[in-house]
């Protein structure tokens, strides 16, 4: 027995030693991996090959590593606009880069203002005498706005160009809510505050239709002007006047029709495109058929270095802080990808306290959201301004409602003609279910010590006292909003109220009525702020949260195209859905599911007073909104859709 016990102890000791050794090896390897920074890849003489297989955004959505490891989360690639533009502009003057190629096969879009900025960068490449070649199976409005700036536009034999113009379907729920016996209590200010109309009506009000038609018309004119300037031979009028007639003239062949209308130059598949590029930059003999000498976007950005792309920037001259307010403005620490009020206010306060920055530029690309979150961000910007530094706002695709609220401390506001702004108004929607409960045999009763006891009561119903209190709060919020704008724009509250009332404006009209100071992009806003700060040399520093090492590695692997760019002639991985005309039309309708989910979550989510532009969501860089809204609805209200389906039967 003694011998057996001794052997057992030896075996246990060996086992414990091996486990300890393995744990040390595992955590040591993990620490090494997290601290490892890959060296920049080698830039080959040839083309800068850019494959956009996701949306272009102002700020990349933070990836939650645990969600990804468990199989959830959004794994689509996202491309940061200022990184993409920086790479393209650098390629124009880089002797190693002889051409730029764009693969838009799985491009999922961006806002019109962002696309115009990228197009302007492509123009710089062309003006430097370098060709820009672009390919896709099916071009839509967004991808074609980029393609128009190319030297050669290639379309797949099974593809074409589908130009639809801005517009689409809006969903209204008044009759549905009546059928479900759900009362939507709406509190609003503004004749044009159409964000609440889906809960009150079954169609657009005349006022909302008037405002939306004006904005959509301005966007369409701007799109056509951009395309016509970049590609004069493109006959957009022929394509949009009678699309069926245009296609039938080419025997229903959409690719041939695109060439006939001057929208495309050549018809060919990916291999043929690669061979054509190889004629310009040389063949990659180690690659598959049609491969050409190229450097991928991720590798090229790594070679360029940090440049102006973050808090580690080592640029010359004074530092100009740039903070991004992108996506819905929400309470808390959400984002990037959405604008958490606490998170962004903390970034701004930290930058102000450091004393390292000569000016602040606020990049706004948001339809608004929570009033309290917008006010938290606005107050932080005002505190920064109290340090006697200039503040500029650069409006992107959207800077409406809460997006305009956060812009009010600015010394100067820059926008583009296609920017959507205004929507100065607020609202709140709270449902109650007393009639719905009565339908299934549930009664309610209450005991009151004051008129507000137990109010607002979403099960027993609202009484007049609480409705009056809530409406007074919305009225007060609107008056504050108007007052902030009046002070910022040096006008009277009455004058601002005349152009407010929740009405949405395009950037051109907004400049004429005094809501915007001048046209200009982010670079011009930074330059203005630097000059105002008496800087002869400057560099922008983008304020970002420090991400943990593990999250950073996951972000690098899943959100960068360094490893995802397809080989020059290889097949790109599909990001979902087909690529031909029928699939594109069908996929576009999936956005309605996202709209429904977002509207339902807005009704049931208890989001408080909102300075939000509902009609703006389909106009800006909201490419991932449908997926996000459905996920949010499923997370916040599990089983709700099944319950609704059962109730309607």
Image: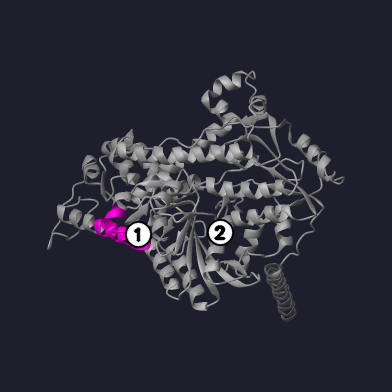
Q: Decide if residue 91 is on the left or right side of residue 583.
A: right
Is 112 in front, or is 73? 112
Which residue position holds label 2? 524
Q: Residue at x 73, y 72 (%)?
A: 18
Which residue position holds label 1? 485
Q: Decide if residue 200 is on the left or right side of residue 304.
A: left
Magenta highlight on residue 484:
yes
Q: Position of residue 90 (x, y in %)?
A: 71, 56
Q: Secondary structure at mark 2?
A: helix
Q: Is residue 302 above or below residue 578?
A: below
Is 51 in front, or is 626? 51
Q: Residue at x 63, y 30 (%)?
A: 160
Magenta segment range? 474-497
Of labels 1 and 2, earlier in sequence is 1
**Count of numbered marks:** 2
Q: Is residue 319 above or below residue 513?
A: below
Q: Residue at x 63, y 57 (%)?
A: 83
Q: Position of residue 32 (x, y in %)?
A: 71, 70
- Label number found at residue 567: none
Q: Position of residue 484 (x, y in %)?
A: 34, 62
């Amino acid at each position: 027995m003694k011998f057996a016990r001794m052997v057992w102890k030896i075996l246990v000791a060996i086992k414990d030693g091996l486990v300890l050794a393995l744990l040390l090896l595992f955590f040591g390897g993990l620490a090494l991996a997290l601290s490892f920074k890959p060296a920049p890849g080698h830039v080959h003489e040839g083309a800068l090959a850019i494959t956009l297989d996701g949306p272009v955004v102002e700020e990349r959505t933070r990836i939650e590593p645990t969600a990804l490891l468990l199989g959830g989360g959004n794994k689509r690639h996202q491309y940061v606009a200022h990184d993409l533009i920086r790479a393209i502009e650098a390629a124009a003057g880089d002797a190693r880069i002889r051409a730029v190629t764009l693969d838009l096969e799985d491009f999922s879009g961006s806002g019109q203002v962002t696309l115009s900025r990228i197009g302007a960068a492509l123009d710089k490449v062309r003006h430097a005498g370098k060709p820009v070649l672009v390919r896709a199976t099916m071009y839509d409005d967004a991808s074609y706005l980029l393609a128009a700036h190319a030297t050669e536009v290639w379309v797949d034999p099974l593809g074409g160009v589908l130009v639809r113009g801005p517009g689409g379907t809006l969903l209204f729920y008044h009759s549905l809510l009546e059928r479900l016996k759900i009362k939507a209590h709406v509190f609003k200010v503004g004749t044009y505050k159409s964000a609440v109309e889906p809960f009150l009506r079954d169609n657009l009000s005349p006022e909302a239709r008037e405002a939306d038609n004006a904005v959509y018309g301005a966007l369409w004119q701007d799109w056509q002007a951009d395309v016509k300037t970049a590609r004069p031979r493109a006959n957009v009028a022929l394509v949009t006047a009678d699309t069926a007639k245009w296609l039938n003239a080419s025997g229903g062949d959409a690719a041939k029709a695109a060439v006939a209308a001057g929208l495309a130059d050549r018809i060919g598949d990916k291999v043929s495109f690669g061979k054509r590029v190889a004629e310009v930059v040389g063949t990659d003999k180690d690659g598959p058929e049609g491969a050409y000498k190229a450097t991928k976007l991720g590798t090229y950005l790594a070679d360029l270095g940090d440049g102006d792309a973050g808090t580690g920037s080592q640029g010359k001259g004074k530092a100009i802080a740039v903070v991004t307010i992108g996506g819905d403005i929400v309470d808390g620490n959400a984002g990037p990808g959405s604008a958490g009020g606490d998170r962004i206010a903390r970034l701004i306060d930290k930058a102000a306290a450091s004393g390292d920055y000569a000016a602040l530029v606020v990049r706004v690309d948001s339809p608004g959201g929570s009033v309290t979150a917008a006010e938290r961000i606005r107050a932080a910007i005002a505190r920064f301004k109290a340090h006697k530094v200039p503040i500029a706002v650069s409006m992107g695709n959207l800077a409406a409602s809460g997006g305009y609220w956060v812009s009010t401390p600015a010394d100067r506001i820059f926008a583009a003609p296609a920017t959507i702004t205004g929507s100065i108004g607020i609202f709140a929607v709270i449902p109650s279910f007393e009639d719905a409960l009565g339908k299934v045999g549930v009664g309610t009763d209450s005991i009151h010590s004051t008129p507000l006891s137990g109010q607002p009561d979403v099960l027993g119903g609202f009484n007049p006292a609480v409705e009056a209190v809530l409406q007074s709060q919305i009225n007060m919020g609107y008056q504050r909003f108007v007052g902030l704008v009046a002070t910022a724009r040096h006008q009277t509250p009455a004058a601002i109220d005349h152009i407010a009332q929740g009405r949405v404006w395009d950037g051109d009209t907004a400049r004429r009525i005094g809501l915007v100071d001048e046209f200009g992009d982010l670079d011009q806003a930074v330059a203005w702020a630097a000059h105002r700060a008496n800087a002869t040399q400057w560099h922008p520093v983008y304020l970002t949260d420090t991400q943990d090492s593990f999250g950073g590695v996951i972000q690098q692997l899943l959100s960068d195209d360094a490893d995802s760019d397809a080989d020059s002639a290889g097949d790109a991985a599909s990001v979902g859905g087909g690529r031909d005309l029928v699939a594109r039309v069908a996929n576009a309708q999936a956005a309605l599911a996202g709209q429904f989910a977002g509207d339902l979550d807005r009704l049931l989510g208890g989001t408080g007073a909102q300075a939000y532009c509902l009609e703006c969501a389909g106009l800006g860089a909201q490419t991932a909104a449908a997926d996000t809204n459905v996920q949010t609805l499923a997370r916040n209200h599990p089983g709700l859709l099944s319950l609704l389906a059962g109730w309607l039967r």
